[in-house]
Amino acid sequence: MAGISIEISMIKQLLQLHQQGTGIKTIARSLGMSKNTVKKYLHNETVELLLSGKETRNKSNQEELQALFPDISKKLEETGFTLHHLWCKYKATHPGGYQYSQFCYYYQKYRESKNAVMHFEHESGDKLFLDYVGKNPPTSNGGTGEIINCEFFVAVLGHSQYTYGEASASQQKDDFIESVQNALHYFQGVPRVLVPDNLKSAVNKSSKYDPCLNEVFLDMANHYGCAVMPARSRKPRDKSLVENHVRILYTRVYAELSTQTFFSLKDLNAAIHTCIVRHNNLLFQGKEYSRKLAFEETEKEVLKALPQERYEIKKFTLVTVMKNAHIQLREDKHYYSIQFRYIGEKVKLSYTSKEVNIYLKGERIAYHLRDRKKYKYTTVKEHLPSQHQFVSDWNPDKFIHWASGIHPTVKQYIGGVLSQHAYPEILYRACVGILTMTKKVEKERLVKACEMGLQMNTYNYGFIERILRNGTDKLLTAETEEKSQLPDHENLRGEDYYKNMCND
């Protein structure tokens, strides 16, 4: 078989040289043949036809096989399919096709062409790659001696490969965002794009074309004025730079610290920082500059400036506006007002440790400073309907001032009402009912009714209402006037006489 293979290749060379106009003597000398042998093959028409036919047939077989490889690749990802099994199916439909060894050879070539890697030159200040190291450094609880595993976060700038690393308690959203912020402040600037892995703290749902980003992480990126472009799922080459650094840091950080014991994250991070500084100062292999030098000369000035304040993590929840034009922040059991025209609407609540924002369809419709007092109300008067705005001003001083404008006796009586042991809103309603009696009866009648209440030490709306409804204040006034009209007489003993008798 090998001899035939060599002979055919020699004949191809002979024919090619002849087609290029090379003489028979030169062809014979170049190929180590006699002139007669060259003449023999040149005059053998069947050789050229045979060679051209076999070449065409081989080309046709390759084209057919190449067309089948995409489907073969998909089948190999399914359970139960092997390359030999698929070759058997191929031979059944292509009896003149390649044997198994050549079939495997061409398939391997196909796979290599599909896995070709493109080299990327990262632009200065463009991307910051974010990832966690798989194997994490442990810390020890100083009180119990228990070993606590923490997470090792790594951030690498694409152009200079300047690196930041730290240990954190977890990969949860709050810890992840805090680590990213620490990295940005370590670099003293902000890149154009953050490239995280597909962890839940950054990506809610991964997608090759349109990933769904975590809302809080996206809000943090907007605060720093940079975009987010997650690495594609199952595409490690998208973040090969940080993956390579992870392997390097295993040697330069993890191996360095693995024999030491740390009793807090603060101590561990101090040791990690020392290792990272050493790593950034090491010269690149075969080059005369380090990551730090490359960063300071080519990338530091290109990064965008940091905002004045660090990002404060926001929490989000959906709530429905209650009929009293308030919403409840369930975490604090505190209530905040919102314009009454939004009653019944479902709104988004965004809050931090300092403030509460209320949004409807992406537009902020209310803002409050956060108050953690349970079961209390934070109310903006303008948020309420006009009749409710009056109620929102209820307080003891308001009613005392109102009553003093009517009469000192009424003021004294209202003070007695407010001193009762009852729910404040109930007392306020009683005060409103009493004071608005001036719209129904003469002021003198209300003053008399309050005077009667003071004499009987009875302080409530019901008592005043009955006095005025039944006209008791009028009867008492009439009796007083009648008594004042009685003439003086020696047989009239007077009320003092009877009071003394009662005392005796």
Image: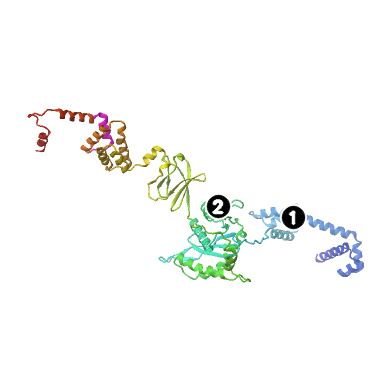
The local secondary structure at tag 1 comes to helix
Q: Could you tell me which residue is drawn at 72 percent across and 56 percent down?
A: 87
The local secondary structure at tag 2 comes to strand
Classify 10 Å Cα crowding around label 2: few (below 14), some (14-19), many (20 and above).
many
Apparent side of residue 115 relative to residue 490 in the rendered image (left or right): right
Give the amino acid type for the residue marked by disc 1 in the picture: Leu
Give the amino acid type for the residue marked by disc 2 in the picture: Leu
Does the image show residue 403?
yes
Say if 376 sits above or below 190 in the image: above
**Figure quadrant of residue 244:** bottom right
Which of the labelled discs sits on residue 213, or is there none?
2
Q: Which x, y percent locates residue 109?
A: 71, 60
Classify 10 Å Cα crowding around label 1: few (below 14), some (14-19), many (20 and above).
some
The number of numbered badges drawn on the structure is 2
Which of pointers 1 and 2 lies earlier in the amino acid sequence? 1
Q: Which x, y percent locates residue 101?
A: 73, 61
Please report the bounds of the magenta region as a residue range. Answer: 458-471
Say which of marks 1 and 2 sits in front.
Answer: 2
The residue beneath circle 1 is 65
Alpha-carbon span between mark 1 and mark 2: 42 Å
Does the image show residue 89?
no
Quarter that holds the C terminus: top left
Apparent side of residue 114 relative to residue 332 in the rendered image (left or right): right
Q: Nearer the viewer, residue 221 or 133?
A: 221
Q: Which x, y percent locates residue 324?
A: 41, 40
Residue at the left extreme of this rendering: 490
| Whether label 1 touches label 2, CB < 8 Å | no
Q: Nearer the viewer, residue 206 or 103?
A: 206
Q: Magenta span: helix, strand or loop, mainly?
A: helix
Quarter that holds the N terminus: bottom right
